Image (cartoon, rainbow, N blue to C red):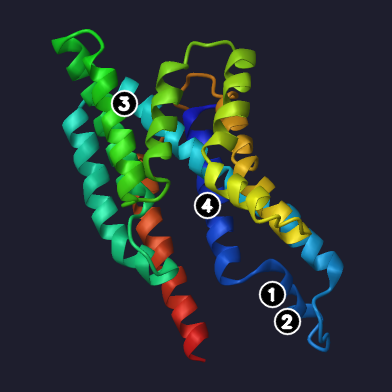
Amino acid sequence: MSFFTLKLVALLSMLWDHLTYVWPLALTMEVLFFPEVSETIPALLVLQRATDYIGRIAAPVFLFSIANGYRHTRNFKRYALRLLIFACLAEWPYYLLFGFHGNIMFTLLLGLLTLRLVDWGNGKRDGLGYVLAAGVVIAAQYLSLTEGNGFYILLILVFYWTESWPVRRKALLWLFLMPLSRYKLIWMFFSEQLFTYRWFHMLCLNALGPLLGVAFTFCYNGKKGAAFPGDKYLWYIFYPAHLLLLGLAQQTLLAA
């Protein structure tokens, strides 16, 4: 799977996730096809729960793309500046749609800067870069300023450091690491005994669902893939643009 195809999969996954955030699948199908129903149809609810996993592919692929992009970029400063500009452009649409700040492009930017910090620090003194990276991860996790916080930055580092590992070895690591990144949800599930289908689905969706995205990164063949004029900016423009359109649509629905 080429890098172009991988990013296209992530883009469609993200679009599905955000579309069903505004228009939940079960509710939308009921309104369109079963307007007389007074209660949610169980089969539609099951379908929605199953298709929720589609939206969990995107984040790991985007995190992987930063690790891969850092390794292959010809101009680090332009790469970082591009992320910063579109992160700023996406912030208001992100808030409009979700009601809080810190869109994932800021997380990706922090991850990119952390990769550079590791190389810079290790160039100054062996091991210094790893210490600095740990500091960034801890600070980002504690301050909770961006989507995914410090754990997403850690995952970017893991993608970068394990690129040459055999797939089996990487799979074992991710089977441990991804659930660990959702430790708060897992702790809440067991400590508060939230043993219901709804909460079990949420636990699986967020602790195990992103492993689907990780699995897609294992299919990367190292090739750039299809290209066209301006393709570099398609992914950046799409993010704030679709957030804005969906945010406006949501506000219209709420005002109706």
The percent position of residue 226, horizontal first and vertical second, equals 47, 32
Question: Could you say where residue 96 lies in the image, as x and y percent from the top left?
Answer: 38, 71
- Measured Cα–Cα span from mark 1 to mark 2: 5 Å
Left/right of residue 148 with respect to residue 232 in the rendered view: right
Give me the C-alpha separation between circle 4 and circle 3: 22 Å
Mark pair 2, 3: CA separation: 46 Å
**Residue furthest to the top:** 126
Q: Secondary structure at mark 1?
A: helix
Q: Are marks 4 and 3 in contact (CB under 8 Å)?
A: no
Q: Which residue was labeled with disc 3?
A: 70
Amino acid marked by disc 4: Met
Q: Where is mark 1, residue-wise? A: 28
Residue 27 image point, x, y percent: 71, 75
Cα gap from disc 3 to disc 1, whole angstroms: 40 Å
Q: Which residue is mark 2?
A: 31
Q: Secondary structure at mark 3?
A: helix
Q: Nearer the viewer, residue 32 or 50?
A: 50
**Vertical side of 181 occupied by 18: above or below:** below
The label shown at residue 14 is 4
| Residue 7 appears in view | no
Indicate the secondary structure of the residue bearing disc 4. Answer: helix
Instruction: Tell me: residue 37, above or below residue 147.
Output: below
Between discs 2 and 3, the one toward the N terminus: 2
